[in-house]
């Protein structure tokens, strides 16, 4: 029987896009044949096939402080400018079916009788294709210039797509089929389908490493007070991965389908 070796990788800031651990994960992944990613599955237990790409951005708007009643004409309202920027971002996402834009944080201003000179927004972009990500970057540059000129403010925007879109290629499909065969032996079905979420599988797929994604427990309601996990699925997933490793140890190639 062949010897089966593995490495376990736990990312502490995956929810932030793995900004620190991602490059190290990619470096270490180069010495491996395949990857099993324990992101949560779909609520019915289906694995995750395709994933959107994801980018995180921050905009800092700087205007000019002034008294709102005595001399408002001397001010440049950073909050108003930021609000216009956010509206245009929303319109970008609505106009392109391959983009989703979520502004998740806005901060600015101090007192209602003071024209604010600083405002900050952070947002996330999901792109189904690399072309959609490129379209967003170009559109963002145009929005940036337009809003800055309209309100007489300066806007600094930083961010990028840290995770490219993931598509299930032929090599990864072979891993899924092998796992499905193990599930059949256990008396279960194992389908797979796309998800709008992202994971470190996006990074691994970009390296050309075949990987199965969504091997974590069943659950739903992520990032809400109603988030839940099916406790019994922990045992189900452990049994599935055990069967898969035993299959490899028995000499069955992972890409045998």
Image: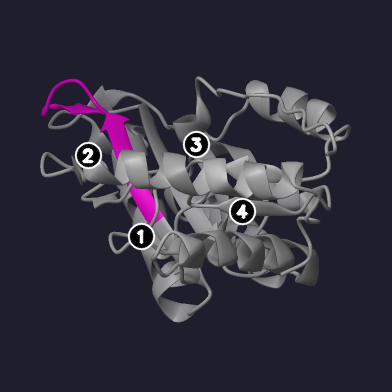
Q: Is residue 82 above or below residue 92?
A: above
| Element assignment for label 2 | loop
Residue neighbourhood size for the residue with mark 3, other residues' Cα within 10 Å, grouped as few (<14), some (14–19), many (≥20): some
Residue 212, numbered circle: 4
Determine whether, in the image, residue 198 is placed left or right of residue 208: left
Q: Residue at x 45, y 54 (%)?
A: 197
| Element assignment for label 1 | loop
| Element assignment for label 3 | strand
Q: Is residue 127 above or below residue 158?
A: below
Circle nearer the viewer, 3 or 4: 4
| Element assignment for label 4 | strand
Q: Disc 1 and disc 4: Cα gap in Å? A: 13 Å
Q: Residue at x 78, y 71 (%)?
A: 170
Q: Which residue is mark 3?
A: 58
Q: Earlier in the sequence, mark 3 or mark 4?
A: 3
Residue 45, numbered circle: 1
Q: Is residue 66 above or below residue 214?
A: above
Residue 233, numbered circle: none
Q: Which residue is mark 2?
A: 231
Residue neighbourhood size for the residue with mark 4, other residues' Cα within 10 Å, grouped as few (<14), some (14–19), many (≥20): many
Tag 2 near tag 1, CB within 8 Å:
no
**What's the magenta region?**
102-115
């Amino acid at each position: 029987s062949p010897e089966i070796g593995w490495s376990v990788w736990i990312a502490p800031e995956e929810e932030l896009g793995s900004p620190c651990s991602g490059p190290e994960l990619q470096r270490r992944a180069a010495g491996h044949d395949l990857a099993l990613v324990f992101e949560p599955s779909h609520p019915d237990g289906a694995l995750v096939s395709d994933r959107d790409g994801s980018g995180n951005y921050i905009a800092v708007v700087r205007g000019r402080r002034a008294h709102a009643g005595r001399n408002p004409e001397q001010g440049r309202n950073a909050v108003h400018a930021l609000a216009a920027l956010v509206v245009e971002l929303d319109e970008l996402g609505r106009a392109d079916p391959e983009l989703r834009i979520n502004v998740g944080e806005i901060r600015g201003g101090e007192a209602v009788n003071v024209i604010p000179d600083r405002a900050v927004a952070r947002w996330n972009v999901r792109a189904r294709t690399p072309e959609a990500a490129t379209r967003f970057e170009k559109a963002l540059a145009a929005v940036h210039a337009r809003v800055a000129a309209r309100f007489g403010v300066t806007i600094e925007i930083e961010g990028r797509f840290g995770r490219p879109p993931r598509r299930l290629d032929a090599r990864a499909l072979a891993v899924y089929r092998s796992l499905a065969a193990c599930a059949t032996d256990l008396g279960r079905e194992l389908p797979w389908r796309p998800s709008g979420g992202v994971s470190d599988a996006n990074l691994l797929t970009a390296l050309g490493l075949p990987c199965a994604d969504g091997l974590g427990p069943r659950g739903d309601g992520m990032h809400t007070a109603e988030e839940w996990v099916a406790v019994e699925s922990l045992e189900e997933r452990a049994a599935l991965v055990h069967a898969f490793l035993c299959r490899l140890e028995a000499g069955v190639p992972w890409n045998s389908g």
